[in-house]
Amino acid sequence: MPRTITYLASLSLVASFAPSVLAQKDSCSHRILSVSVQDSLGRPINGLANTDFEAQVGGKPLKVLSVAPDRRRHRIVILLDASISMRQGWGNAMSPASDLAETRLPGAELAVIIFNERVIEKIDFNEGQRSVVARLRQIGSDAKYAANSVGGRTALYDALLAGLRLLGTATSADILYVVTDGEDTASNTKSDELARLLSSSGVRVYVPLVHDIRTFPGATPEDLHRVGDLSDLVNKTGGEMLSPFASGIPKTPKEIDQFGSLMYDFYRRMFDNYLLEVEFPEPLEKHRSWELKLSQKKREQWKDSRITYPTELSGCV
């Protein structure tokens, strides 16, 4: 499939932060979170202020102290699932990884982990985006790669943990971008413990789900449970799961353009977001779920809008 090359020129990722956001560090009573707000078409809504949000935890309101565009540099670890369930249609399945790597992302750094039941291959950040692009192109043009290298069980959560470790000292500016079908059949890492580690770090998980087993006629309850666990993990981190091939593999020029537009909007939601600073009514000493929504006025203005935010807050240490 031809790779869609887009340019996210609207993103200025290296500008300075708003002073109030910079001055306030995470604590038991404050938290700075990455939040994305989209309109009914999935496009980012810009220009919002702290008074445009409402938040609560445990039924008690949270103060939204400040909201500022997130201008940080972003590090992205592309995790490419190369287990046996990904072998069928491998060339198309890996296209979301190639498409992201080929996209010009101002101020972004890329790394790659290819995995099945173990890490097969790794390209670190210090090797640069050119190395990532070159390797994925090489894999895409190798007609024998799927037969020789795609197989084995899936240790998805172990791979996510490896991606988190690759980031080192991580923040909510960092992203794990996982190209997978959502299966996990071999991990030692449990989804709940991984969720807590990701929540504590602020790292967000984005998943282009290449084979959405939830739509398969023969999907078992266990299959649905596995994908549900991954979806829950994504929500807790403030990321997003997308099924780019829900309408089939794009073949015609029109379908390929539609695929490119779909993925472009997905990338924008990864990058074009806010840093939202909240104050808790009492020290947050354990992991808690919370609720964030637009104000009534903004909900009326932006009908069918959606907020993507980390639904689980980590307790302070």
Image: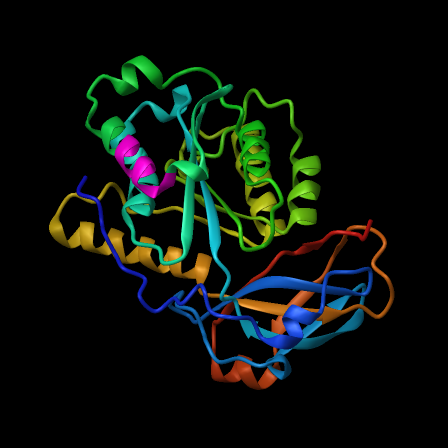
Q: Does residue 179 show up?
A: no
**Residue 200: percent from left, percent from top:** 70, 48
Q: Which residue shows up at 74% across the image and 51% down it?
A: 314
Overall secondary structure of the magenta stretch? helix
* In this picture, residue 78 sits left or right of residue 98: right
Is 165 or 285 nearer to us in this picture?
165
Q: Does residue 273 show up?
A: yes
* Highlighted range, magenta: 128-136
Location of residue 146 by image quarter: top left
Q: Which residue shows up at 53% across the image and 50% down it?
A: 174
**Residue 93: percent from left, percent from top:** 31, 34
- Which coloring applies here? rainbow
Q: Which residue shows up at 60% across the image and 47% down it?
A: 170
Is 128 or 300 nearer to us in this picture?
128
Location of residue 145 by image quarter: top left
Residue lying farthest to the left in this orientation: 253
- Is 294 situated above or below 213? below
**Residue 66: percent from left, percent from top:** 65, 77
Taking the magenta stretch, the answer to whether it contains residue 4 is no
- Is 107 situated above or below 85? below
- Is 48 situated above or below 223? below
Q: Quadrant of the N terminus?
A: top left
Residue lying farthest to the front in this orientation: 126
**Residue 119: percent from left, percent from top:** 48, 22
- Number of marks drawn: 0
Location of residue 258 by image quarter: bottom left
